[in-house]
Image (cartoon, rainbow, N blue to C red):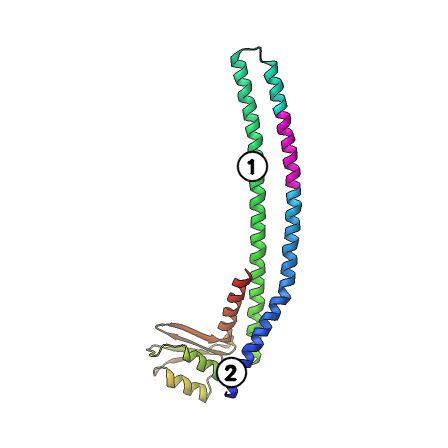
Amino acid sequence: MSPVLSEVLFEVVNLAVLAAGLWWLLFRPVTRALADEVREREQAASTLAADRTELDAGQADLTARRSALDAEIASGSHAILDAAHAQAREIVEAAHAEVQASREAWDDEQRRRMESAGTEAAARVAEVTAEAVRELLTRASGPDLDLALVRATLGELPETVEGPVWVELAREPGPEVRAALEARLPAGFEVRVRRDLAAGVRIGTPAGLVDGSASGMAHAAAEQLGSRVG
């Protein structure tokens, strides 16, 4: 195995270990946040249960009042009795509607809060992971790493590459990097220097973009980890 390939494999292993460590370090605060959310939800549930008990007591009182009213007007006219029944039904239905509305509002609020907590945690994990990957590749950047990333990126291209083609590099290409590009790409390709790529190369062709830069790999790692945590 060539020294360059061994170095790349070593960096990849280090990256995997770092990502696993970050995941474990961030899992505890995320778990604590979710536990706090569960406690708040239990407290809210207790409050809602008390409210429901109060509403049930009110409903029982209304039912008792309705029974008393029925007994009082039993000897009255049918018109008065029907009106009293209608009023009692409206009161009971209004109480039921209030309980249902309170229950639905509470459920919606708890669902929104849980979804918000999960989204924020996933975004934070992805952000930290991206920064760690970018920092690792930036520190390890150099001619050997650039050449290895360029060769790996060229290997992702279609067998036949047609122009126009542009190449973005983190620094001016050395002789070996330029030779590798010229051997694989059509003549006349454009070379651009992008310091924000940190290391590696980004190649654009009419068929699409192949991103083998440190910035691109950091973004991909962040998206993958964020989707798993989320």
Q: Which mark is residue 145?
A: 2
Which circle's residue, 2 or 1, is located before the other in the chain? 1
Q: Is residue 42 magenta?
A: no
Counting from the top left corner in percent of width and height, residue 172 is at 47, 83
Q: Indicate which label's residue lies in the foreground, 2 or 1.
A: 1
Residue 81, placed above or below residue 156: above
Q: Is residue 143 visible?
A: no
Q: Which mark is residue 100?
A: 1
Q: Is residue 55 magenta?
A: yes
Residue 68 position by quadrant: top right
Q: Label 1, secondary structure: give it.
A: helix
- Taking 224 as reference, is 72 left or right? right
Q: CA distance from mark 2 to mark 1?
A: 63 Å
Counting from the top left corner in percent of width and height, residue 72 is at 61, 14
Residue 179 position by quadrant: bottom left
- The overriding secondary structure of the stretch rendered in magenta is helix
Write the start and end of the magenta stretch as one range: 47-62
Toward the viewer: 203 or 160?
A: 160
Q: Is residue 104 visible?
A: yes
Q: Which three-letter amino acid code belongs to the residue tagged 2? A: Leu
- Taking 61 as reference, is 218 left or right? left
